[in-house]
Amino acid sequence: MARRRWIVEPAGAGRWRRTWMAGGRRPVFGLPEEVGAADLAARGADVFVAGFQKAAVTRGQFPAAGRGILALHVDERVRQAGYFGPEEPLLHRWKVLGRRGPQLVLSVLSCSEAELHRIWDEFPEGAAEGIRRQVPAVAAVAALAGRLIREPVLVADFGASHLTLVAAEGGIPAYAQVVPYSEPQRPEPEAVAPAVAFAVQAVQRQTGLRVAGVLPVGPLRGACPPRPAPGVEIVEPDWAAVVGPAAAAAAPEAPALYGAPFVDPALDLLPAARRWARAWLDALPPLAAGLGAGALALAVAAAVLFVQARHLEDVYMARYRQLQQERRAFEAGLPAPDRKADLERLLAIRARKAGEPDLDQVLVRLAEAVPNGVKVVRLQVRREGAGSGRAAPEVKDPARLLDRPLILEAEMVTQGGFSTVGARFDRLERGLDPAFDLKKIGWMYDEESAEGYLSCRLIPRRAH
């Protein structure tokens, strides 16, 4: 009988959800079960699914360069989106999807290093030694979708407190967005459709992919409307063909758990030191047959020290090679004296652009701030100084144009009693405040139609 590999993910409140997988090309899975920390430590696990509060997916073209310089380009692109803090240490994993001329096409998954350490700290003591893979939930959901459906698909994962929308192609994530519920365990179908429609358009705009349909998963997937977006239908794959008949009903409930073994190794988050330690521990049983207890303990200690030293050596050598590449690239790219003025002007434009809010992220934050029951009926985006329906005034220096902030003029409506409307608009204003400067906000209520109307002018806050 094939060896079972155990997959585990957090279930909340100190509990863990796990299942097993056996077989190779046509694997079979067991049913999920919830266990406590003691049970998990007793059996251990092979694959650990990490659910991050903040994880970003970026798909795009990057300069074809050495890994060190490429890492700098990736980090800069991810930080420009404004999803993470400017000084927040990040961990990036990427999959090379292809090449277009001098550019590489990458799918990048980014997470906070501090959150990664916190996740490991919460893992039960004694259960981590057997972990061979650590995969982010977003990548696991995308990997499962790639096994189920050949075409690009938008996975709508209805969790307990939020909806996660993940676009996947070939089992690799291309886009991810989190839409929180107004109340836990209560996704509202009328709020799902606009979020899905926005995601479908954002996927096409940012990645060029046209999704073939929407795949609802998660314990609350029944909240997904039959037609979640214009021109987009729900897809119903053959779950039994991927996870086996016994787990066909359970897999849609826990997609990350069943998709984790299929995640591409390029997106694995397991730290290098743990990979080396795992390799040494796998090699110890043959050694134990010829060593006494004392010698075996020394061998284990030596293995641990070797892993740590090897990891530090790898870190420092990678940094040394990166600096050498940067030095050579810098020297080769020094401009001629007559190009210095043009370079200074370009750098000034780039410096100002770095603080410019990304429009896609601005719209995502606006969508996240709008509570259920409130509809945006008009939205106009323009530069300060441009009147409604007119383009921004021409300026001789493009860098000066970036000094003029983006302005969003929005009109929203909601129906209900006066107190209900007032509460929704108050919640809207509180949700907008962290990401926008609110100018000219006001609302009125029509008792005859039981409808509230709000208009506002919003200025996205610049990144610091």
Image (cartoon, grey):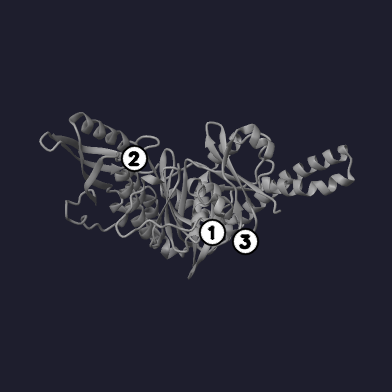
Q: x and y percent of residue 301 in the render?
A: 79, 40
Q: Decide: few, some or many residues near mark 1? Use Cα within 10 Å; few <14, some 14-19, many ≥20.
A: some
Q: x and y percent of residue 150 in the render?
A: 47, 63
Q: Is residue 287 visible in the rendered structure shown here? A: yes
CA distance for labels 3 and 2: 47 Å
In the picture, measured across the screen, residue 343 lies left or right of residue 372, that is: right
Q: From this viewpoint, which residue is outermost toward the bottom? A: 101
CA distance for labels 1 and 2: 45 Å
Q: Decide: few, some or many residues near mark 3? Use Cα within 10 Å; few <14, some 14-19, many ≥20.
A: few
Residue 67, quarter of the rendered image: bottom right
Q: State if disc 2 and disc 1 touch (CB < 8 Å).
A: no
Residue 31, quarter of the rendered image: top right
| Above or below 391: residue 31 | above
Q: Quadrant of the C terminus?
A: top left
* Helix, strand or loop for disc 3: loop
| Marks 1 and 2, the one that precedes in the sequence | 1
- Numbered badge on residue 241: 1
Going by the numbered disc 2, the residue's amino acid type is Ala
- The residue that disc 3 covers is 25
Q: State if disc 3 and disc 1 touch (CB < 8 Å).
A: no
- Numbered badge on residue 435: 2
| Marks 1 and 3, the one that precedes in the sequence | 3
Q: x and y percent of residue 174 in the render?
A: 45, 56
Front label number (1 vs 2): 1
| Above or below 260: residue 332 | below
Q: Decide: few, some or many residues near mark 2? Use Cα within 10 Å; few <14, some 14-19, many ≥20.
A: some
Q: Nearer the viewer, residue 397 or 411?
A: 411
| Marks 3 and 2, the one that precedes in the sequence | 3
Q: From this viewpoint, which residue is outermost toward the top? A: 419
Going by the numbered disc 1, the residue's amino acid type is Ala
Q: Nearer the viewer, residue 366 or 17?
A: 17
